[in-house]
Amino acid sequence: MEGIYTQPLNSDAVSMDLLTIQTQPSYGQLLGSSALFGTIDLYGAKFNVGRDRRCSLVIDEVHFPLPILSFISNIHFTLERDHTDRYNPTYMIDNSTNGTYVDGKLVGKNNRAILLHGSKISIACFTNIFVYNQPDYNAPQEVDSEVLKKRYHIGRTLGSGSFGTVYLLHDIITCLPYALKIVKKQRYGMNLRGTSSLLNEANIMQKLDHPCVIRMFQFMDDVGSISMVLEYMQGGDLLTRIMDNGFLPENTAKFYFYQLCHAIYYLHGEGITHRDLKPDNILLQDSNEYTLLKVSDFGSSKFQDSITFMRTICGTPEYVAPEILESSGQKMYTCQVDVWSLGVVLYTMLSGLLPFGNMNGKNDAEQIMRGNFSMAQPVWRSGQSCRSKKLIYDILNVDPNQRPSIEMLLESVWFRNSNVVQHARSLVNLPSLTGKV
């Protein structure tokens, strides 16, 4: 590498706020390649390395002769760590002119990379001058894939269920966040049906490309587990958003419901019936009230064409359509089952309640098959419009042929002349419409 002289040591480029105060326990170490550096414990939110005397680690003529020292910048690189979560990654920021390298790859001036335990750091023309050591970090035991362990920092748990766990991932080169869904085959069951369900989900997700549908970027079928690298939605799921607020204001519910309808319209156009729509499977991009929404979890989904029919009993009981319950696995049903689930989701958003539950001695299934629900609860006197209530009654029609189609839902009068609908359209890159939506 050709040397370029950097700013002199008396430069004012470094401010005093770069000084590191050891108020936190050490989160890791830099292991020097020579005894001149030794083992350096890392503290605080920032740790700077360079020639400037105010750096956390000063590189000077004790380490290198003065002519060679000119290859090192005043601040050559900075390590940053957010201590609010012990599972957060450690970032390396390249502040140098002559380059900082992680495992032989140039980070690039003002760019970031993530350090893994054992990452080798080179600066300018000095190869592998440090090794990053993080003794308290171990990848989760569920992760079998060596590809995952080498490419991503695997962080905190985002959620878990009876069959698998979802972790927060960060790509070590781009630093972009993702969600890792991992299912242990032993826990799920190695039977053909269980494995085919997971492969079915991956097969469906690989074909999807819509702003309101979660994306899958990578799929790995390892000996002990199946892993999916998915789009990360920082805002959590819709169920949590509803529970945190009791119920959603009508405009907020309309904003979300319009996006949901477009997602289902897209899926049905691709020949896919979701079959397990519920607030738990609807994810939000961030914590803002008016944010992008995405449908996830395609484990129960089904490709359907002119010669494929659906008979399987599946879905979550409170959201399942009556024709699925009535089929007993024998009768056919259509993609209208998703429209029914949309009605239950809308009811829940506007009230914080489920329309069907144990009541008057009747169980969920009996109420669903009779379409027996009520809006007599006090929450329904909170200002919800007649149009929103009528739409729910129209959707929760036990006869799928009398239920509005997804196309009809998008043409609903509830959506017309609405600023929040126009906002939703702009968010998902749909052209603005005047009057009718």
Image (cartoon, rainbow, N blue to C red):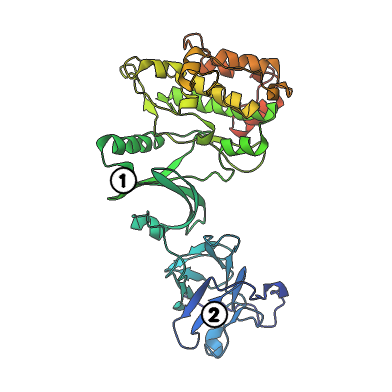
Image quarter for residue 50?
bottom right
Where is residue 196 drawn, in percent x and y?
30, 35
176 vs 68, nearest the viewer: 176
Residue name at image x 35 percent, y 36 percent: 203
Q: Residue 375: which quarter of the image?
A: top right
User: Which of labels 1 and 2 is toward the front?
Assistant: 1
Residue kind at label 1, given as amino acid type: Lys
Splitting the image into 4 quarters, where does residue 69 fall? bottom right
Residue 425's place in the image compared with 78, above or below, is: above
**Residue matched to label 1:** 185
The structure residue drawn at horizontal position 52% and vertical position 88%, both measured from the top left corner, is: 64
- Residue 124 visible at all: no
From the image, which quarter does the C terminus lie in?
top right
Residue 252 seen by the camera: yes
Q: How many marks?
A: 2
Mark 1 → mark 2, Cα distance in angstroms: 52 Å
Nearer-N-terminus badge (1/2) = 2
The residue that disc 2 covers is 71
Q: Amino acid at mark 2?
A: Phe
Look at 59% across and 24% down and name the residue there: 346
Count neighbours of disc 2 (C-alpha within 10 A) and say few if under 14, some if 14 to 19, many if 20 or more: many
Percent position (x, y) of residue 388?
65, 18
Could you say where residue 263 lies in the image, as x and y percent from the top left? 52, 28
